[in-house]
Image (tube, helix red, strand yellow):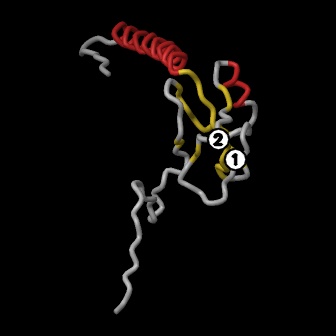
Amino acid sequence: MKEQLTQKRTSRRSSINGTRNVLNISGKEPGFVYRVVNDVGDRIEQLKEIGYEIVEDSKVQVGDRRIANPTKEGSPVKVSVGGGVQGYVMRIRQEWKDEDQAKKDAHVDKIEQGLVRDAKEQSDYGKITVGK
């Protein structure tokens, strides 16, 4: 009699066709917005100035599970993003991110209003509407 090999399926299987999300962040703490930031120029320092912090939680992982990707307790969570560049996981409080986004939205709204006003003043006929 042939023995049948049985394999237990995991709840989440990785894709084999190359459509994995290698920058997916898991193990996030609620109340924060996470992102991977490339360590180029002074990008990390710029984000620190507006409230982001480098994540040093060993429960936070980037991408799919990897066999040999140990992280020492208290060291930054990072991932190679290609071209010799490292990406660091950073986070900001959700409320601060929402405040920043509201400021950006207000700025865009102001620009759009100016464009519509200028277009109306310079047009001889027709109707201009801007919708979101």
Q: Amino acid at mark 1?
A: Thr
Residue 117: which disc?
A: none
The alpha-carbon separation of the residues under discs 1 and 2 comes to 6 Å
Q: Residue furthest left?
A: 126
Horizontally, residue 32 falls left or right of residue 123, namely right
Residue 58 in the image: above or below residue 68: above
- In the image shown, does 30 or 123 lie closer to the viewer? 30
Residue 50, percent across and down? 65, 18
> Element under label 1?
loop
* Residue on which disc 2 sits: 58
Horizontally, residue 21 falls left or right of residue 49, namely left
Residue 13 in the image: above or below residue 35: below
Image point 45% across, 10% down: which residue?
110
Image point 70% across, 45% down: which residue?
86
Residue 65 in the image: above or below residue 89: below
Residue 3, percent across and down? 38, 85
| Quarter containing the N terminus | bottom left
| Quarter containing the C terminus | top left
* Residue on which disc 1 sits: 71
> Element under label 2?
loop
- In the image shown, does 125 or 108 lie closer to the viewer? 108
Residue 59, percent across and down? 59, 41
CB atoms of marks 1 and 2 within 8 Å: yes
Image point 53% across, 26% down: which residue?
32
Q: Residues within 10 Å of mark 1 (few under 14, many from 20)?
A: some
Horizontally, residue 55 falls left or right of residue 97, namely right
Q: Amino acid at mark 2?
A: Ser
Q: Earlier in the sequence, mark 1 or mark 2?
A: 2
Image point 33% across, 10% down: which residue?
120
- In the image shown, does 30 or 16 lie closer to the viewer? 30
